[in-house]
Amino acid sequence: MEKIYTKVFNLEGREVGTIELPEVFMTPFRPDVIKRAVIAIQSHRLQPKGRDPYAGKRTTAESWGVGYGLARIPRLSTGRAKFAPGTVSGRLAHPPVVEKKIYKKIPKKEKRLALFSAVAATARKEIVEARGHIIDKIPALPLIVTDDLENIGRAKDLKNVLMNLGVWLDVERVINSIKVRSGKGKMRGRRLKRAIGPLIVVSRGESIFKAARNFPGVDVIKVKDLNPEILAPGAHPGRLTIWTISSIEDLRKISLVKEAG
């Protein structure tokens, strides 16, 4: 396979060299497989739900039969309808059951293809733009930065780096998108809605996690923890991603191990 090289930038946004891209970035774009993998990951967070088998049935109501000029649904001696679906305090027609299988699984090879395809999508300008990210001032995709990025420990310093790399415009897009959710979700731990911002992929840095946690929409993750959902939130691939040199090398090793396996 033909080798592909891309530019490497420092924290000031200046080009300092080139690096060979891993073969992962040449993976075909498979949005269908990515969507299946993301839905499977999301299903692992769902809690099984079911109804009491006797809910709505704890009543002495019985149908009166015919001849009363009334519907033949179960009734109390007072004439009030009970038990049947659609009546006050009646049972549900098709209630949720605990036995329903909500934990979705996909084959290992399909899961690997979804991950690799989601990684490759981060390097394609048209896909990143289609997702809504602002990349007008970003020098190159995939955006690869020196390992000095992993040692940043202050939010102020990280903001300067994001501005130098042309990524801060996308963070501002997220800040401007924050709004109060309509409906009762406001009372259930989901008060605010906001867009998804850039992702920073590192190899082993710890301080940058604290530096980035105050920027809405910005996530930091290690290469070993990558999954299709973090790279394609909502099953929409093409998240704006910043890679460090070490994370690219780790990604190269992971891809070689998985291909050998």
Image (spheres, grey):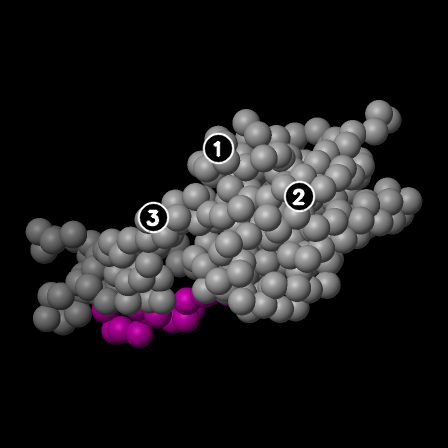
Quadrant in the picture for the N terminus: top right
For the magenta stretch, what is the residue range?
A: 47-62
Place residue 87 in its image quadrant: bottom left
* Number of the label disc, if any, that sits on residue 177: 3
Point 45% across, 64% down: residue: 214
- Between disc 2 and disc 3, the foreground one is 2
Looking at the picture, which amino acid does disc 1 mark? Asp
Q: Is residue 253 left or right of residue 24?
A: right
Q: Position of residue 32 (x, y in %)?
A: 60, 33
SS for callout 1 = loop
Residue topped by disc 1: 136
* Camera-side residue of 197 and 116: 197
Magenta residue check for 56? yes
Point 84% across, 25% down: residue: 2
Looking at the picture, which amino acid does disc 2 mark? Phe
Magenta residue check for 67? no
Name the residue at the right extreme: 260
Q: Is residue 116 visible?
A: no
Q: Position of residue 223 (x, y in %)?
A: 71, 55
Place residue 165 in its image quadrant: top right
N-terminal label among 2 and 1: 2
Point 91% across, 44% down: residue: 260
Point 48% across, 62% down: residue: 156
N-terminal label among 2 and 3: 2
* Number of the label disc, if any, that sits on residue 9: 2
